[in-house]
Amino acid sequence: MVGEPVSRKAAPRRRIERIDRTGSWGRVEYEHHLDCGHVERRKRAASTSEMACIGCVLAEKHQTNLAKQVDKPEFDEYSSILDQLAHQVAMSEREAAVIKAALVSTFGVQPEAVDVVLEDNDGTLNLSYAVVLLSADEVRSILSRA
């Protein structure tokens, strides 16, 4: 489909709403704004009030291809289980991100200095431990606040 030539004779004719001149000297193009919403670029301004719209032909081909690709998907039990697992992992990762953000806020360190480790327990991810790397200055700062 990509790169296929489109016949201007087969394209539907649309009314020209306006013509805009674009480009610099020697590279001038005329943008014909059609009533269908498409824009046709040509080297010369049209002398008629209608012109063939290649955009309509391409849009129709695209819609046809989409209709072929978007048949009703068949969901089997396997993909449903995978979706549930992906959801559980995403929720666990979200909880880990919340814990990491809380540790970053509590200790006043950069996010790169905190590592949250999750552990798989019978198919569910649970917090195993967290590591917070503190420089000597950060340790002194925390101790001075206490």
Image: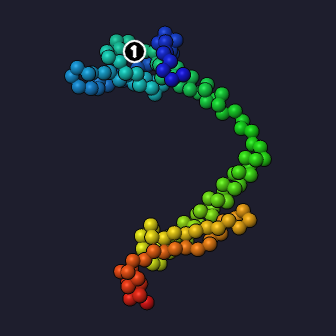
Extreme-left residue of the structure: 25
Which amino acid lies under the numbered mark 1 shown in the image of this protein?
Ser
Which residue does the numbered mark 1 point to in the structure image? Answer: 49
Residue 77, placed above or below residue 88: above
Along the line of sight, the residue nearer the viewer: 89 or 37 = 89
Q: Is residue 114 visible?
A: yes
Which residue is depicted at the point 74% across and 39% down?
74
Residue 83, placed above or below residue 134: above
Extreme-right residue of the structure: 77
Query: Is residue 65 found left or right of 146 in the rendered image?
Result: right
Along the line of sight, the residue nearer the viewer: 100 or 115 = 115
Residue 96, placed above or below residue 35: below
Scheme of colours in the image: rainbow
Which residue is depicted at the point 48% across and 70% down?
114
Which residue is depicted at the point 52% across and 20% down?
57
Neighbours of disc 1 within 10 Å: few (<14), some (14-19), many (20+): few
Which residue is depicted at the point 61% across and 30% down?
66
Q: Is residue 105 visible?
A: no
Q: Quadrant of residue 123?
A: bottom right
State the SS at label 1. Answer: loop
Spot occupied by residue 86 in the image (x, y as percentages of width and height): 66, 54
Q: Quadrant of residue 128?
A: bottom right
Spot occupied by residue 33 in the image (x, y as percentages of width and height): 39, 24
Spot occupied by residue 63 in the image (x, y as percentages of width and height): 59, 27
Query: Is residue 127 found left or right of 51 in the rendered image?
Result: right
Number of marks in the rendered image: 1
Spot occupied by residue 82 in the image (x, y as percentages of width and height): 71, 51
